[in-house]
Image: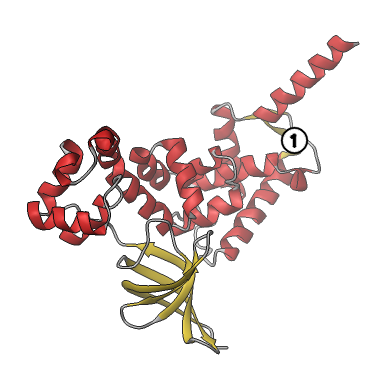
Amino acid sequence: MTDNKTEVSGQIQSIRFRNSDGWAVFTLDSGQPCTGTLAEMIDVGSEVTVSGTFVDNAQYGRQIKCEKVAPAPVKTDSPSGVVKLLQRLPGIGPKKALEAVQLHGAEHAWQLAKTDPETIGVHPTMAEPAKNIAESLVDNIESTIYLLGIGLTDNKANSVMSHFGAKHAIKVVSENPYRLMDIDGFGFLTVDNIAFQAGIDAGNQARVSACILYCLKDSQKNNGHIFFYGKELIAIVIDTLTESAKKSEVPLMNMPGYDRVREAIYGLQHEGKVVIDGAKVFDKELLDAEKLIEDALKKDK
């Protein structure tokens, strides 16, 4: 087996196999065979950029084993882009979508989808739902493309859009990817890798603060306690930040040292997210939960 990193752009010419999780065997228009996970929005004819490694397969020859398959943006002023968009409306298949674009032109057909979808073939009973879908479709697709591009799966991208709203997801995540930790299923180590994909620097202050809160909450690191002694916490945070960066294979330039982490801890205290009591540093949520349990036990006595 050979193992060489590569990145290739092209149109999906055929999909030989695709399972319910999206894993597929497909071919680009260049004839290049690929394997990888395709988002729901990606199909035959989709423009994509694939990145991964070349591997030798006994049956299909040299394939690209894709780590990421990122779709190209869908344009509402291009015939092919609007055909793809229209097919997401109820009752509109490839034939009706193509006919609408040929009859009305790309931009006007897309405008009709948002104002008078019956004109392009939507059944009258589905006209209002179609308008709503068309109105939000571009935001959804743009957000999905962005989120897939920084390494999220289809399901995780949907979770992010559900939490922040499709219209705001790109802004929220690009400004501070560590906001993803507000969502169930997004831990620091997962989000840190996503943040690097989004272009975050290893010394980013939001990254440092997120790691502090993660270490305080992580029972494997704090041995079940709800606090760390300050110097111990700083050492563990620096080690966690360094190991995560190495795992994501990013340069270790501008990695925060003792003073930067210490400063971030006091910043979190100012925000009301940690409590400093002498040499001890507590996560505020865990400390509040502990006090509630103590109060409940006292009442039961």
- Which residue corresponds to the image point at 70% horizontal and 32% vertical from the top-left? 282
Front one among 258 and 160: 160
Residue 197 found in image quarter: bottom left
Q: The residue under label 1 is which amino acid type?
A: Phe
* Image position, residue 250 (x, y; %): 51, 65
Above or below 18: residue 266: above
* Image position, residue 226 (x, y; %): 75, 34
Residue 202 in sight here: no
Left/right of residue 128 with respect to residue 267 in the rendered view: left
Q: Which colour assignment does the render follow?
A: secondary structure
- Which residue corresponds to the image point at 46% horizontal and 43% vertical from the top-left? 160
Front one among 237 and 160: 160
Secondary structure of the residue carrying numbered label 1: strand
* Image position, residue 230 (x, y; %): 71, 40
Name the residue at the left extreme. Answer: 104
Left/right of residue 22 with respect to residue 223 in the rendered view: left
* Image position, residue 146 (x, y; %): 37, 53
Q: Quadrant of the N terminus?
A: bottom right
Above or below 13: residue 116: above
Front one among 149 and 19: 19
- Which residue corresponds to the image point at 57% horizontal and 33% vertical from the top-left? 268
Residue, disc 1: 227
Residue 89 in sight here: yes
